[in-house]
Image: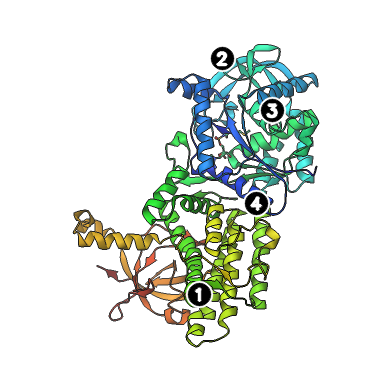
């Protein structure tokens, strides 16, 4: 049997349930798994729960439950949440399972027999939150470098001779450029190893929870040491069958657990066992809230399914596609080298601009026109060669980004294709062709339907339910194989489509509708105080320059001047205004809005426009010229 494409997530501590920070690693792995399956790989996707930590036993006690009862419940909750997020794992390992404890003990024994583990004395600082030992010199103000409480631990313990692997680790990293990505993380690992590795303490006193050291029941195996073993215990190591999966093709994780654990301890353990190293370790950045990492201990968690549920409630989209909006958001804002900040405004903006305007509206327009101009059928036609070439370029770029674990880039290219679809609609103007009974209508509508089909395939790894919904509109089966995306004859002749349906209704529209209702019923809550109003700083700004944001069909990057000051904003007005219309014009600008990124471009505020009858933007301009920078009240 061909070797499988083996993907792993870290196994999660069961002292809390997933939030959008922890869900990020799992989502990234799921997108990779779905893409590789479409590529024709036999994928094996493993996730699971890390249940033997001291903090788990403490959390159980706090909940008034036995540790086993507690881990059973939380682990089940993880499965439920992953199920809700449509995570397509093939196996779920729990470190309290016999298949794991047996292998963890076997690894310990083999390393001990080979002389890699010895008995010694341990004295040092232990961070229970991160289950990590620190040296005195590593503490910051008496706390761990991450700001967690530490406690002094003194006991005789077993040590793993990590220091003996320095040279081999450095050599492996150097010879295998894809072993650790991104590059910044690799550099961190290399300098960490070069500072000198200390032997790792790999046991703890047995306090009644954990995996006993073989032959010494007074100790349990250090939780990190045995947790790492899950990646091979789940696939049946040491039985030869494990080679069907191992080495793992990609091990996804956040940057916090890469340097000390996955890129040093783990490969050294494998070297000691004589087992091959994984091919690639990806250490992504963090999802922050304000300036802090989202984490249970900081109490700032946002749960992915609640975010989806809330979106469904506010926008009116179905719950299952709301989950895909969250999946899309996570993929599109995947922190690769740096970190990303979560705000609900960013989330809403991404939803309205990318999913509603670019994707859902584009598709809706095509299906509506097929219904009204072509009797609900896709006529036989030909796609212009230039569209085929353009789209194929995009398909290649998306595939490259997915293969290189760059989800944020893949998402941008996918939305870029939605942009091309909208441009094609505006270029073909099917409504004019129809009015003039122009026979070119068949080619035009076939081309547009072909774009929708392409989008369905490209977006599938990130948003499988959304892709199914698109299939429902096209009445076509799902695209299973990546290499069929973009085939020109992908749609049968005179194929009948479904009635049009807006998959993602605009949040803005819903808000506008709600506002209208509120005005009609004169609901008092809608009133704001004068003080509240004055918090919004409005100023007259002049457009110095206007540039289209690449791969979008609605966005302009505007450079504004207000006297001495210059700012830039991203505005969705490209369908109504051209650069020439805009440059030199005075506008009303909200100057104290928190900056946010739109398609990778920082938008420092907002310009005011009215919503036209068809949702088009109508810019607000002063009645006569006022000095640039003048306040507006
Ligand atoms: N149990 C260990 C892993 C053992 S693997 C052999 C662990 N668990 S965890 O639940 O704390 O974290 C799991 C994953 O979530 C890690 O990849 C971690 O980087 C990621 N994240 C946790 N909070 C995060 C953010 N706020 N942002 C991005 N990822 C974060 O560590």
- The dot on residue 405 is 4
Q: Secondary structure at mark 2?
A: loop
Task: Report the residue marked by disc 3.
Answer: 198
For label 4, the crowd category at 10 Å Cα-Cα, with few meaning under 14, some 14 to 19 and many 20 or more, is many
Q: Earlier in the sequence, mark 1 or mark 4?
A: 1
Q: Earlier in the sequence, mark 1 or mark 3?
A: 3
**Depth order, front residue of 349/64:** 64
- Distance from disc 4 to disc 2, alpha carbons, whole Å, reads 41 Å
The answer to whether mark 2 is within 8 Å of ligand 1 is: no
Instruction: Specify whether 628 is left or right of 598.
Output: left
Task: Report the residue marked by disc 1.
Answer: 375
Q: Secondary structure at mark 4?
A: loop
For label 2, the crowd category at 10 Å Cα-Cα, with few meaning under 14, some 14 to 19 and many 20 or more, is some
Residue 343 seen in this snapshot: yes
Q: Do residues under tags 3 and 4 come within 8 Å of each other at their CB atoms?
A: no
Relative to 258, does residue 139 appear above or below in the rendering? Answer: above
Instruction: Specify whether 562 is left or right of 264.
Output: left
Q: Quadrant of residue 247?
A: top right
- Distance from disc 3 to disc 4, alpha carbons, whole Å, reads 32 Å
**Depth order, front residue of 31/278:** 31
- Distance from disc 1 to disc 2, alpha carbons, whole Å, reads 71 Å
For label 1, the crowd category at 10 Å Cα-Cα, with few meaning under 14, some 14 to 19 and many 20 or more, is few
Task: Report the residue marked by disc 2.
Answer: 208
């Amino acid at each position: 049997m061909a070797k499988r494409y083996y993907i792993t997530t870290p196994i999660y501590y069961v002292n809390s349930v997933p939030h959008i920070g922890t869900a990020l690693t799992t989502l990234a792995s799921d997108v990779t798994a779905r893409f590789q399956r479409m590529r024709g790989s036999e994928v094996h996707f493993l996730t699971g729960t890390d249940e033997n930590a001291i903090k788990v036993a403490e959390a159980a006690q706090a909940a008034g439950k036995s540790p086993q009862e507690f881990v059973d419940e939380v682990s089940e909750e993880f499965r439920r949440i992953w199920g809700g997020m449509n995570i397509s794992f093939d196996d779920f390992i729990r470190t309290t399972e016999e298949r794991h404890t047996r292998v963890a003990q076997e690894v310990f024994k083999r390393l001990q027999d080979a002389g890699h583990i010895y008995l010694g004395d341990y004295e040092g600082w232990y961070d229970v939150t991160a289950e990590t030992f620190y040296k005195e010199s590593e503490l910051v103000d008496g706390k761990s470098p991450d700001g967690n409480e530490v406690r002094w631990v003194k006991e005789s313990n077993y040590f793993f001779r990590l220091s003996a692997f320095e040279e081999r680790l450095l050599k492996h990293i150097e010879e295998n450029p894809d072993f650790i990505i991104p590059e910044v993380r690799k550099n961190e690992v290399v300098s960490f190893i070069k500072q000198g590795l200390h032997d790792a303490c790999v046991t703890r006193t047995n306090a009644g929870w954990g995996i006993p050291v073989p032959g010494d029941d007074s100790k349990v195996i250090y939780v990190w040491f045995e947790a790492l073993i899950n990646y091979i215990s789940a696939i049946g190591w040491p039985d030869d069958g494990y080679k069907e999966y191992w080495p793992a093709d990609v091990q996804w994780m956040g940057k916090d657990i890469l340097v000390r654990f996955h890129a040093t301890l783990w490969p050294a353990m494998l070297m000691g066992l004589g087992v091959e190293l994984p091919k690639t370790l990806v250490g992504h950045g963090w999802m922050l809230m304000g300036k802090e990492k989202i984490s249970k201990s900081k109490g700032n968690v946002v749960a992915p399914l609640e975010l989806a549920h809330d979106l469904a409630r506010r926008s009116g989209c179905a719950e299952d596609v709301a989950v895909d909006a969250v999946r899309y958001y996570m993929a599109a804002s995947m922190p690769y080298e740096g970190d990303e900040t979560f705000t609900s405004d960013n989330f809403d903006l991404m939803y309205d601009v990318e999913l509603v305007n670019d994707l859902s509206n584009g598709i809706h327009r095509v299906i509506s026109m097929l219904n009204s101009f072509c009797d609900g059928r896709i006529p036989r036609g030909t796609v212009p060669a230039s569209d085929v070439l353009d789209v194929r370029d995009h398909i290649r770029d998306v595939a490259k980004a997915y293969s290189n674990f760059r989800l944020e880039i893949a998402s941008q290219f996918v939305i870029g294709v939605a942009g091309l679809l909208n441009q094609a609609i505006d270029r073909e103007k099917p409504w004019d062709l129809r009015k003039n009974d122009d026979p070119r209508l068949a080619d035009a509508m076939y081309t547009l339907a072909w774009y929708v089909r392409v989008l369905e395939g490209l977006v599938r790894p990130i948003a499988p339910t959304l892709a199914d919904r698109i299939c429902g509109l096209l009445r076509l089966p799902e695209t299973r194989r990546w290499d069929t995306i973009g085939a020109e004859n992908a749609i049968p002749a005179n194929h009948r489509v479904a009635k049009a349906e807006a998959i993602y209704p605009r949040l803005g529209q819903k808000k506008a509708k709600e506002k209208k209702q509120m005005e009609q019923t004169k609901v008092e809550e809608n009133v704001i105080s004068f003080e509240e109003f004055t918090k919004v700083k409005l100023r007259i700004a002049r457009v110095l320059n206007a540039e289209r944001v690449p791969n979008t069909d609605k966005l302009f990057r505007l450079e504004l001047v207000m006297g001495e000051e210059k700012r830039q904003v991203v505005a969705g007005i490209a369908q109504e205004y051209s650069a020439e219309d805009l440059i030199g014009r005075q506008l009303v600008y909200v100057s104290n809005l928190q900056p946010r990124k739109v398609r990778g471009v920082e938008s420092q505020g907002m310009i005011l426009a009215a919503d036209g009858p068809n949702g088009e933007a109508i810019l607000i301009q002063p009645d006569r010229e006022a000095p640039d920078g003048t306040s507006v009240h």
